Amino acid sequence: MLNFLSRRIFFAIVTLLVVSAVVFAIFSLIPFDPAALTCGQRCTDQIVESNRIRLGFDKPLYMQYWLFLSGIFLGRSYGTGSAAFNCPAPSFGYSFNENACVTDMLREALPVTVSLALGALILWLTVGVSLGIIAARFKNKWPDRASSIFVLLGTSLPTFVTGLALLIWVTIKWKLVPLSLIGYTSLLDNPFKFFQFFILPWITLAILFAALYTRFTRAAILETLGEDYIRTARAKGVKERTVLFKHTMRAVFAPIITLAGLDFAGLIGGAIITETIFNLPGLGRLTLRSTFEFDLPVVLATTILAAAVVIVMNLIVDMLYAVLDPRVRI
Amino acid sequence: MTKLLTIDNLHVAFPTDDGLVRAVDGVSLTLNEGETVAIVGESGSGKTVTGLSVMGLHKKASAQLSGSVLLKDGDRTVDIVTASEEEIRRLRGRAVAMIFQDPMSSLHPYYRIGNQLTESYLLHNPGKKKEALKRAIEMLDLVGIAEPAERADEYPHQFSGGMRQRVMIAMALMNSPRVLIADEPTTALDVTVQAQILILLAKLQKEFNMGILLITHDLGVVAQVADKVSVMYAGRIVEEGSADDVFYKPRAPYTLALLKSVPRISTHGSDRLKAIPGQPPSLINLPIGCAFAPRCEFTSHAAGDICASDRPELLGTKSTHLSRCHVAESKRDSLFIKEIREMR
């Protein structure tokens, strides 16, 4: 276990280094002068050059990379004297567009995205797994057919359609949920506003994933029901309900958890469309905006963050799997 | 001797898109206590379907059953074909238990052995957790698993194939059933382990005075343990009798062909494996006449085209040794005797 963990953490660090180096290299290939991008409308060569020195773009690429890495652990300051801009550790850079530390921007955006992803995860797991169980239980009967319509709609409707439809009907026409212009409220500050703020984005994401999970759960249950050990359970005199909810679900549970972990990690990387439609100040929108504005430090940081989340979730899923499946020992 | 199980004219058919698959077509047999009845036949002959019918494991929605399967449960007798789902469930694992072909996949991979054994007991003795655990350890010990208390805490993947089959047997016997259905219990095991399992089953049969319905295609296994043998072909019994009768005086051409196809270690070297020519018939379109006729080498000895036009009945001069064939029994005896000698 300890051996497994240390090995995996080592490889996680290597992976992150490679990801960051690759992203760094890609940005250096962009045919723009990064220093020129930092400069506003009234731009002079002098300002560009001073910015270049201030942000370290004058140094060779490996040096820039080194400064970026050391900034994560030691913090970094840009410029000198009274004009210096300080980003304490862990510093992922300085956004010249926003004139802010990238870490602070992430710190603001992350809770929004985590709330979005976590709420949607709970919703889609509940709905998807339940519908999958119902569909498998009543295979080829009307509940199964009804759920397959849901699956078809859920998987084929893009989130920008479901999201916009929800926004138009629920918020604007029926006025069931107020239009969220107030912005993000934390769960601890005001749970009611928090739910009001997130309910439609959750539903939007959950429709897609619930459909996928319904299909997956149904297929996994039906496959497991054909296993020899299920026949053994029936031969012992186990009630059909227990066969389904205990013997079958026990085996179906592990792959669902795996899938959920990875999908959750993917969403942390940014549910760009959903966040944009519902005006959620999360990581997805941050990435999108920074990309359009060539706010390179932010894009770099969000990319690395997304990679880190995927790596960590993979590790968690592997460890969970070992807990859930006695055949897997780590 | 008490009759534990009486199957009478059992038909099992599965409706499919291509037509009705007649998997079992009028099977009758009886099983007494302390007795081993073997059902022998090739794949798709209806052996396993017959076994599953006794367990009531066919879904009412997908299988059509008729005839009767009378199972003794204490003082009463239940007809599995007409009994309710819940009634059958109460019998399963208690009055009748089953062990399966593949012990590697027949145990739940996620539950501890002890847990799976006690579940079997608790289903029919709710709430008696302490007794269940005691019984589980006792049974593991009985089937020859060393350190049963410790091993009860292990998972199936920590057991070898033979050990898992022992666990399956222990689980089947948790509630001391009177009838045990053993569906190819040794097929998936090594030959040495096969013998151990068969010896174990014979020992437990004595101890519990069980009737064992042994389903197999392995004639070697049948010869070792069976008292009575029913040979099945295309969903029907083509020959039944004592193990000695069926092995030494086979009367159905199919039985003879089956015995001839058993590989032998011969002293004069290069004998080829004798397979039965042709394919078993489709269970959707069974021949009008004898199902084995297209593959049979004795049809010319029957009167006219009777093999192709009429189904033979299960008959015999001795009431304990019956066979299906249109060729006269005396003629068959003289025809077969030469072939049987050749085999030895």
Image (tube, coloured by chain):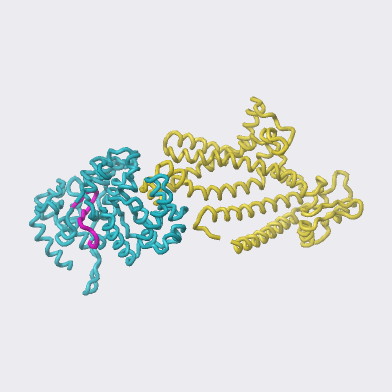
Compared with residue A202, is residue B194 higher up or lower down, i.e. above or below?
below
Q: Which image quarter: residue A123?
A: top right
What's the magenta region?
Answer: B223-238
Q: Identify which residue is drawn at 30% across, 54% down.
A: B182
Q: Identify which residue is drawn at 29% across, 52% down.
A: B180
Chain A colour as displayed: yellow
Q: Which image quarter: residue A241?
A: top left
Compared with residue A180, is residue B54 higher up or lower down, i.e. above or below?
below
x and y percent of residue A308 in the render? 67, 54
The answer to whether A51 appears left or right of B55 in the picture is right
x and y percent of residue B234 in the render? 24, 50
x and y percent of residue A15 in the render? 66, 59
The quadrant of the rendering that contains the C terminus of chain B is: bottom left
Q: Is residue B132 magenta?
A: no
x and y percent of residue B50 in the render? 27, 48
Chain letter for the cyan colouring in the rendering: B
